[in-house]
Image: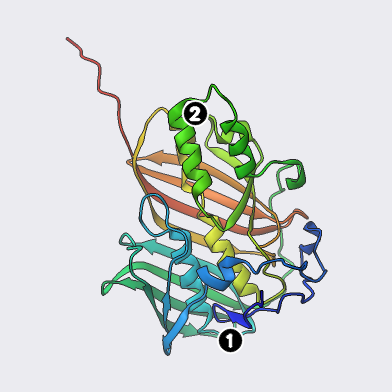
Amino acid sequence: MAAPASAGGFRVPAAGARAESPGSGDRPDAGQPAPAGDLRSVLVTSVLSLEPLDLDLFRGRHYWVPATRRLFGGQIVGQALVAAAKAVSEDVHAHSLHCYFVRAGDPTVPVLYQVERTRTGKSFSVRSVKAIQHGKPILICQASFQQTQESPVQHQFTMPTVPPPEELLSQEELIQKYLQDPNLVEKYRLGLNKILAQEVPVEIKPVSPSKTFCQLSQEPKQLLWVRARGYIGECDMKLHCCVAAYISDYAFLGTALLPHRQHPVKFMVSLDHSMWFHAPFRADHWMLYECESPWAGGCRGLVHGRLWRRDGVLAVTCAQEGVIRVTQSPAESKL
């Protein structure tokens, strides 16, 4: 399959181009041509590919729609960053974004992305993006870009020690394993089959599978190896940031529910999403996603996330708050 010359407004290498970048030594194909038949990631060819309509105006379409029948927040954030990146020069890199989800997305119609060139400075540039459906914004995004600058002020946390992804089963393999259990409760079997039927363009390997699919309450933390399905290769770093924006929202808010599994969820939706990009990375290489929820209350939950390269470099930090409404047990009678 021939790869497009560009996707989402970025220059993307043709299949077979050499792929060398910081942190690229985490995959057998690192620094090598794309394997024969290795399909270009759908995140590049479809999900994050925008159609230009006018200066700083773009149209995006949908690929995967969750069972809630609302648009996937990660897709809207990723497409908004694509639109913002189209309005800056190639010599700057994305360093942060801050988004508010203001209305539910309609999966039956495309999304328009309107970019405002808020400020272009010598070191930093800001672009404001509105994602619009039915004439009203569904998301408001501020993205900031920076010229590369060196500094002696550097530090980071230490990456958690976990088994490498090669020693772990994928989410699909784990589900298939659990479905073979003849004693599996039927409602859990139906739920696992629904997950298996979804064509999610993200590969996931839970570090602690027993906790991932456990129905018991546990601490609000989880560790996942994640990467984009398919091949992206060496290209403008801004594209990898857009793909990471998509990946970062998958299963993120659910971290806040881990201690509360006794409560059936009635409604859960993201309110805002922020990201900070620290170091170059490849979104089609395995990264460790460290998620934790420091607080929940008032029908809201807060989650923090860190995406680590395999060499221990902290590549991305994320934060999100969302609405979480659950079914409460009837209060016991005091009579």
Who's the residue at 78% across and 58% down the image? Answer: 27
Q: Is residue 60 above or below residue 216?
A: below
For residue 54, which numbered disc appears in the image? Answer: none
Q: Amino acid at mark 2?
A: Gln
Q: Quadrant of the N terminus?
A: bottom right
For residue 215, which numbered disc appears in the image? Answer: 2
Q: Secondary structure at mark 1?
A: loop
Q: Amino acid at mark 1?
A: Ser
Near-viewer residue (231 or 318): 231
Q: Quadrant of the C terminus?
A: top left
Mark 1, residues whose alpha carbon is within 10 Å: few (<14), some, or many (≥20)? few
Q: Nearer the viewer, mark 2 or mark 1?
A: 2
The picture places residue 289, in percent across and down from the top left corner, at 62, 50
Who's the residue at 67% across and 62% down the image? Answer: 284
Who's the residue at 43% across and 59% down the image? Answer: 73
* Residue 301 visible to the viewer: yes
Mark 2, residues whose alpha carbon is within 10 Å: few (<14), some, or many (≥20)? few
Q: CA distance from mark 2 to mark 1?
A: 48 Å
| Residue marked by disc 1 | 89
Q: Earlier in the sequence, mark 2 or mark 1?
A: 1
Q: Quadrant of residue 222?
A: top right
Colour approach in the figure = rainbow
* Residue 294 visible to the viewer: no
The picture places residue 306, in percent across and down from the top left corner, at 61, 52
Near-viewer residue (63 or 86): 63
Near-viewer residue (154 or 33): 33
Q: Give the side of residue 268 with respect to residue 310, left or right.
A: left
Q: Give the side of residue 11 with respect to residue 297, left or right.
A: right
Q: Residue furthest bottom?
A: 55
Q: Residue furthest left?
A: 335
Q: Secondary structure at mark 2?
A: loop
